Image (cartoon, rainbow, N blue to C red):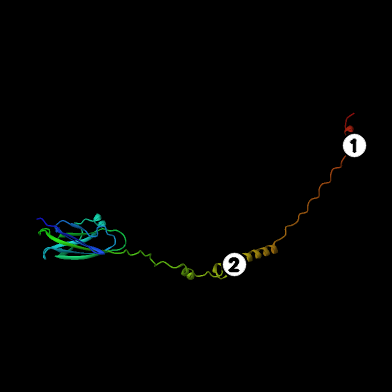
Amino acid sequence: MIFGLKKTIKHGKTGMSRTKTYAITKRHQLIDLNQDNVNFKLDFMVQAAGPDNEFQAIVVTQEQLNQVDLNKIEMKSAKHKINGSITANNNKYQNYFLVLKKKDEDSPDFNAEVSVLLEKVEPVPETKPMENFTPAEEQEEAATPLPPFYRRRNFWVGLLVILALIGLFVYYRYFYNKTAVPAPVVAAAPAPAPAPVQSPETQLYKEIAQIPV
């Protein structure tokens, strides 16, 4: 069976509408919705030729098409007509596709008319999260001033430790000086008297006297 195709495109002041007839078969029919438009508001409608024609539809992105198997994805069933809308205003390009196929693979193929109305919109400016943001003035006011050093606990603990060490030093020094026994003083032995010094003449006389005659 051969199906005729009809395509109508209308341009308005702020948008564009187009209508095209597609053959709905057991194979997935991909319809490019936004083409090269980045920021837009889009409405689409699918209308089968007969009131009893049943089909399945779903909208996916190009990224999803690259990652999933269309034969395993769950689609929404419709009878005769279905419509939907898409809004993209984050200034990031994403290509959207409408996927169509007939619900009963054994039923005859049929035609469906797809109408798309696209209106370009201004991107929404990005805003930084404010949950954790506090102005510098409020941060300075909210800061708690530190107490004087003499009111801090560590100061008094350190002072007590120093006083305790000084007290122990004074106590042991005083107690040691008071109870210490002086060591006995040993008198030095008198030095021996020096031998009498003899003159060279006297020594010579003695040596001569000792020579046997």
Residue closer to the observer: 102 or 90:
90
For marks 1 and 2 on the same chain, the one whose residue lies earlier in the sequence = 2
207 relative position to 102: left or right: right
20 relative position to 153: left or right: left
Question: Hey, which residue is sitting farthest top in the picture?
Answer: 213
Q: Amino acid at mark 2?
A: Leu
Question: Hey, which residue is sitting farthest front in the picture?
Answer: 13
Could you say which quadrant of the image residue 84 lies in?
A: bottom left
The circle on residue 159 is 2
Judged by depth in the image, the label closer to the viewer, 1 or 2, is 2
The circle on residue 120 is none
The image shows residue 91 at horizontal and vertical percentages of 32, 61
66 relative position to 213: left or right: left
Q: Quadrant of the N terminus?
A: bottom left
67 relative position to 1: left or right: right
Mark 1 touching mark 2, by CB under 8 A?
no
The image shows residue 104 at horizontal and vertical percentages of 12, 60
Could you say which quadrant of the image residue 13 lies in?
A: bottom left
Could you say which quadrant of the image residue 2 lies in?
A: bottom left
The image shows residue 3 at horizontal and vertical percentages of 11, 57
Residues at marks 1 and 2, CA–CA distance in whole angstroms: 84 Å
Q: Helix, strand, or loop for circle 1? A: helix
The circle on residue 202 is 1
The image shows residue 168 at horizontal and vertical percentages of 63, 65
Identify the residue at image location x=47%, y=69%: 137
Identify the residue at image location x=24%, y=56%: 65
Mark 1 Cα-neighbour bin, 10 Å: few <14, some 14–19, many ≥20: few
Q: Quadrant of the C terminus?
A: top right
Residue closer to the observer: 111 or 141:
111
Q: Amino acid at mark 1?
A: Thr
Residue closer to the observer: 70 or 116:
116
Picture mark count? 2
